[in-house]
Amino acid sequence: MNLRDKHILLIITGGIAAYKMPLLVRLFIKAGAEVKVVVTAAAQEFVAVKSLAIVSQHPVYTDQYLQTNDADLAHLDLTLWADLIVVAPATANTIAKAAQGLADNLATTAILATTKPVYFFPAMNDQMYQQPATQRNLHQLIADGRQVFEPETGFLAEGYQAKGRLPEPATIFNLVVQTYWRQTQPQPLAGKRVLVTAGGTREAIDPVRYVSNHSSGKMGYALATAAYAAGAEVTLISSVARPLTIPAKVISVTSAAELMAQIQAEFSQQDLLLMAAAPADFRSAQPATQKIKKQAGQTDLTLTLTKNPDILASLPVAHPDQFVAGFAAETENLLTNAQTKLTKKHLDLIIANPVGRQDSGFNVDQNQGTLLFRDGHQVTLPLMTKDLMATEIIKQICAYLKL
Ligand code: PMT
């Protein structure tokens, strides 16, 4: 998920955590957004206006802008420009004013003047946060359609642990992106449960060595994210730990046998299975219990491998209410081999992707391929990022299922 070409108005009010906001600006910009920053007079005590101007690549907007902007509509300029307003940290004072519809500075005037989504990240002393007045104001903001995120429990500036801390910039960033996507993108998978698998399995030879492949899990993680953005509740079974920016149930596995056991435990509760994992087709017939030692003069080591079960083929042949998609990773005869796997594994869809190349497939950020649906319908996707490809795959599945 990204924020490409989105305009974010970041309103910083007077809390100690304001000093971390240049990092948040950078995260938004790195995700493709353009950011303008409003600071209240109190916020300027905690964060340098110059730092914010440099990282945002825009002048920083202070209350002075209300007086000096000759158009006399400064609050509207900014709110018309913004796609989204983020208030972080949001003090009890600004929350109270916003809940009452007061507009006595640029920050509160912009909040009052907007019809765009406004996300509040309250941060304050725990006593202030718990006060009935603050809680009433927060509920009022939610009732007015604003998004309010809970502060974290942690070490407060007062020197003790309690609820009131602003989440770290990376957490705020993830919450903003996920929430914005869910609010603004079509949600064809709302109410659907999607199981995604990712990564190559590792089959032990002995306690320190294994047989595996080059799958990085990138394609699976991209699919999990795209399914979430389309509204799904996501379960991800993965053999690799990568940063995941969505809420999902994550199950980690190592071997194909573990992957199979977890898929079989989950499958009946899922509406869709997207099998991007690369389970090893073979495992050591007899993994050694101790590290295999080199013998003096030894030049070869023969390992006997035995076949792993085919996980997809082991699922119920008929799954009328569930949609099952696999990937075919092929170095030759891409479409013919993929078609055979589609039939043999009783799939609704197979995504045939060429592997063994530098620009796409295993362990790179890009991919390409052809979607072969059970009914003969085919869609070819040219080389693109795995994020985009995942979004496109989800779009095509939803179109096929008429969601
Ligand atoms: O992880 P990345 O680095 O991002 O790379 C992505 C990918 C290239 C690994 C991915 O796009 C992909 O192609 N995944 C499937 C890899 C694979 O195992 O392909 P296969 O053609 O051998 O198997 C066909 C299908 O059967 C796959 O969906 C596979 O998950 C499944 N399978 C395979 C073996 C097995 N024992 N049981 C299975 O169910």
Image (spheres, rainbow, N blue to C red):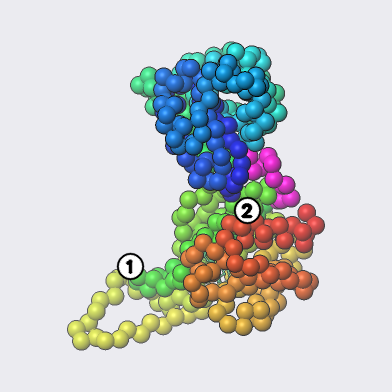
Asked if residue 186 lies in the magenta stretch, the reply is yes
Alpha carbon of mark 1 to alpha carbon of mark 2: how far?
35 Å
Q: Residues within 10 Å of mark 2 (few under 14, many from 20)?
A: many
Give the amino acid type for the residue marked by disc 2 in the picture: Ala
Query: Which region shows up in magenta?
Result: 180-192
Residue 247, position in %: x, y?
A: 57, 45
Residue 394 part of the magenta segment? no
Q: Quadrant of ligand 1?
A: bottom right
Ligand 1 within 8 A of label 2's CB?
Answer: no
Judged by its main secondary structure, the magenta piece is loop
Report the number of discs: 2
| On screen, residue 340 above or below 402 | below
Does 285 appear above or below 160? below
> In this view of the protein, which residue sits in the foreground, 199 or 377?
377
Q: Return the mark for residue 226.
A: 2
In percent of width and height, residue 245 lies at 53, 47
Which SS class for mark 1?
Answer: loop
Question: Is residue 179 at least partly visible in the picture?
Answer: no
- Can residue 375 be seen by looking at this rendering? yes
Task: List the residue tagged with mark 1.
Answer: 208
| Extreme residue in the front direction | 70
In the picture, measured across the screen, residue 254 lies left or right of residue 33, that is: left
Q: Mark 1 CB in 8 Å range of ligand 1?
A: no
Residue 174 horizontal/vertical position (percent): 53, 41
Classed neighbour count for the residue bearing mark 1: other residues with Cα under 10 Å, few (<14), some (14–19), many (≥20): few
Q: Secondary structure at mark 2?
A: helix
Residue at 37%, 73% in the rendered image: 205
247 or 117, nearer to the observer: 117
Q: Nearer the viewer, residue 327 or 356?
A: 356
Q: Type of residue at label 1?
A: Val
